[in-house]
Amino acid sequence: MDRSLELEPRYSTTEMPGRCIKCLAEEGYRGCLSELLKGGSESKELEETYEALVSLLNSPELQKLLDESERHLAEGRDVKVVVHLGEGAPRYELRIGQ
């Protein structure tokens, strides 16, 4: 079964602070780690998400995704990084909206 995790980076506005892909991944990583350390849930999905975020943060693709997403954000486009989970290593996809 193919699951995915979406990270939506944003520039800061007066209403909301911005977040880059790396910041979003680190935030998700810390949340997953906290839940795993509590030991309350033996969730395979939580473990997959944690492993995917660690993989993204350690991936050589992270800098490319950061650079490309920042460029599109600067042009006023919506950006989404989709981390595909499931069998094998996670795959990363950059989706650009209007």
Image (cartoon, grey):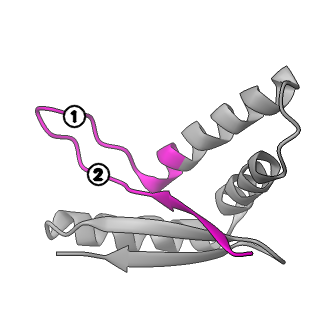
Q: Secondary structure at mark 2?
A: loop
Q: Is residue 89 left or right of residue 68?
A: right
> Which SS does the magenta portion mostly show?
loop
> Looking at this view, is 55 or 50 the one in front?
50
Where residue 15 appears, as percent x and y from the top left, is: 14, 32
**In the picture, which quadrant includes the N terminus?**
bottom right
Q: For the residues marked 1 and 2, what is the alpha-carbon distance in whole angstroms?
A: 9 Å
Where residue 42 appears, as percent x and y from the top left, is: 88, 38
Q: Which residues are magenta?
A: 1-24
Mark 1 lies on residue? 16
Q: Is residue 22 left or right of residue 41?
A: left
Residue 40's image quarter? top right
Mark 2 lies on residue? 10
Are the residues at dot 1 and dot 2 in contact (C-beta closer than 8 Å)? yes
Q: Amino acid at mark 1?
A: Met
Query: What label sits on residue 30 in the rendered view?
Result: none
Image position of 65 with respect to 12: above or below: below
For disc 1, the neighbor class at 10 Å (few under 14, some 14 to 19, many from 20) is: few
